């Protein structure tokens, strides 16, 4: 017999996670509390894939040093060596092992680096040690010759066939440039004074963007050999951390400021990109530590991953918030196994076209492994993943509804249990377990995001709802090792009882 009722459909969640509003004010294509949950290109909510040590093995480094530099250097079309600086040592991964390439150069531990590839040479600097260079596979570090123009520099960029360094030991507002095509020749007057501390150097379009304490300046080629560049201030806002600046397609830059993540159009307009995070998330960060935040652009998924300090006294970056550049929406945070535990990271880079990060125990960590791991680094504990739908009142907030059941649509990925909890301020909801049964691919055997996923079908299972209230949301969670989910949509079925007064006390 057919049920007399109506339905509200939650998902796909194409508008992303919104922390700035309560669930009652969200739309069906919005959700919140996406902890360890990624929102895919089609708006599906799926548990993140975990993380794993780079190359699948533990390091052989004693003392658990902090990894303050990591990356993949494109030495040539056939050679892209992976490197990291852990403690006072510079390492290259070669021959299935980490090899010391420090070559007697001085590296002060616990100082974050910036780096760039420059005409066949990797250049690294940290504002404390002399700038260093590395020519790639098998080579040792060496000092970069800067003609004694400065001793240290905080920021480095390679643009217009020149090497650029800013915020030096003698002048925090000074930007130096090398000769054209020669990164180790520096003219005595080849510098610019910006008037305020330089906080980052990141090229955009045909300009070099110079982030300072007072705004973004740009250098643009003039075609005049005597005055080769025009210096112009473009904005009054700029990045707190140069490592948080990311340039994406469309000549746009995103960066972290004290009150949120901002987008610059490459000309003069700066707009806030993180409004959806304002009230429910951003206020829980430590503002004093935002100057150490860092970010990368995950090109294959059109995402910016931003490492942030979650907690009023947190100094190290321990949360990852993710912004989908194409869809202009947020998801995350990605954090430790439980939603109250965290992993701390010191730097990040794209390696093998995936996000990797350096931790505080000597490891380089793959944060989006192709084979589903459901663990953090060497831990075997399960990752707790959860998200909550909106609690929009489908018949208006004045109508009283009787909630009947929910139909949950998910990909057929194995007989893995998920927990569903009905949540409302006016209902004592119940938690139920639903098994995602059905044929699919085998986790830890087949790779995610490959052709195998084309054969996955969407299944559905019903779960019970209860209570009388205009609002009802569903929290989906999973806290079991080696299990996973991808939810496409959730349909809540109800019966409209019309407009009625609420009780003066208690819940219904």
Image (spheres, helix red, strand yellow):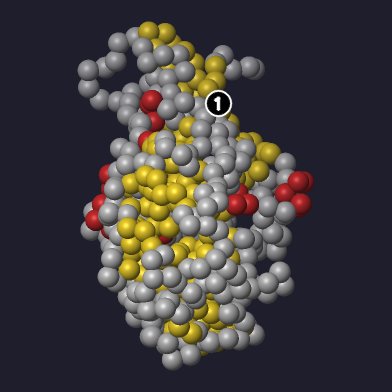
- Residue 14 visible: yes
Q: Nearer the viewer, residue 316 or 159?
A: 159
State the residue lying farthest toward the bottom: 104
Q: Rate crowding at label 1 as few (under 14), some (14 to 19) or many (20 or more) other CA atoms within 10 Å.
A: some
Q: Quadrant of residue 195?
A: bottom left
Give the labeled residue for mark 1.
Answer: 9
Q: Quadrant of residue 161?
A: bottom right
Identify the residue shown where x is 77% and y is 46%. 455
Q: Please give left or right for residue 448 compared with residue 45 in the image.
A: right
Residue 68 appears left or right of 417: left
Q: Write the residue at 59% across / 60% down.
A: 354
Tag 1, which secondary structure?
A: strand
Q: Quadrant of the C terminus?
A: top left
Q: Nearer the viewer, residue 209 or 114?
A: 209
Q: Nearer the viewer, residue 187 or 83?
A: 187
Q: Quadrant of residue 260?
A: top left
Q: Position of residue 26 (x, y in %)?
A: 42, 27
Residue depicted at 55% across the width and 34% down the height: 14
Please give left or right for residue 197 compared with residue 254 in the image: left
Quadrant location, the N terminus: top right
């Amino acid at each position: 017999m057919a049920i007399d009722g109506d339905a509200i459909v939650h998902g796909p969640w194409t508008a992303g996670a919104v922390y700035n509003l309560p669930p009652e004010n969200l739309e069906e294509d919005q959700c919140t509390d996406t902890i360890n949950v990624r929102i895919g290109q089609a708006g599906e909510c799926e548990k993140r894939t975990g993380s794993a040590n780079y190359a699948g093995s533990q390091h052989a480094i004693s003392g658990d040093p902090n990894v303050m530099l990591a990356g993949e250097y494109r030495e040539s079309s056939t050679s892209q060596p992976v490197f990291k600086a852990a403690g006072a040592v510079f390492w290259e991964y070669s021959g299935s092992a980490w090899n010391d390439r420090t070559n007697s150069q001085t590296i002060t531990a616990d100082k974050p680096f910036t780096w760039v590839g420059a005409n066949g040479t990797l250049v690294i600097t940290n504002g404390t040690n002399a700038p260093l260079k590395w020519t790639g596979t098998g080579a040792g570090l060496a000092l970069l010759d800067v003609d004694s123009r400065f001793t240290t520099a905080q920021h480095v960029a390679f643009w217009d066939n020149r090497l650029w360094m800013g915020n030096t030991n003698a002048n925090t507002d000074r930007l130096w440039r090398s000769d054209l095509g020669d990164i180790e020749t520096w003219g005595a007057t080849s510098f610019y004074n910006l008037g305020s501390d330089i906080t980052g150097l990141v090229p955009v379009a045909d300009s070099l963007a110079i982030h300072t304490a007072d705004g973004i300046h740009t250098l643009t080629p003039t075609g005049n050999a005597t005055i080769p560049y025009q210096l112009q201030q473009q904005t009054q806002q700029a990045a707190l951390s140069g490592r948080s600046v990311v340039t994406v397609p469309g000549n746009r830059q995103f960066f972290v400021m004290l009150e949120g993540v901002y987008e610059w159009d490459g000309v003069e307009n700066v707009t806030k990109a993180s409004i959806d995070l304002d009230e429910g998330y951003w206020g829980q960060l430590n503002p004093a530590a935002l100057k150490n935040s860092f970010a990368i652009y995950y090109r294959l998924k059109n995402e910016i991953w931003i490492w942030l300090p979650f907690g009023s006294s947190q100094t190290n970056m321990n949360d990852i918030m993710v912004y989908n550049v194409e869809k202009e929406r947020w998801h995350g945070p990605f954090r430790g196994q439980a939603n109250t535990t965290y992993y701390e990271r010191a730097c990040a880079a794209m390696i093998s076209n995936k996000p990797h990060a350096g931790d505080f125990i000597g490891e380089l960590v793959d944060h989006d492994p192709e084979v589903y791991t459901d663990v953090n680094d060497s831990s075997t504990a399960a990752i707790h993943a959860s998200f909550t739908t909106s609690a929009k009142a489908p018949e208006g907030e004045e109508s009283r509804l009787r909630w009947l059941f929910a139909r949950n649509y998910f990909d057929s990925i194995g007989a893995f249990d998920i927990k569903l909890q009905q949540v409302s301020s006016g209902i004592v909801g119940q938690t139920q377990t639903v098994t995602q049964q059905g044929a699919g691919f085998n986790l830890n055997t087949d790779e995610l995001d490959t052709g195998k996923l084309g054969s996955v079908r969407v299944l559905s299972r019903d779960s019970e709802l209860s209570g009388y209230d205009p609002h009802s949301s569903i929290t989906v969670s999973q806290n079991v090792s080696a299990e996973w989910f991808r939810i496409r949509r959730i349909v809540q079925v109800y019966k409209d009882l019309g407009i009625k007064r609420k009780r003066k006390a208690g819940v219904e």
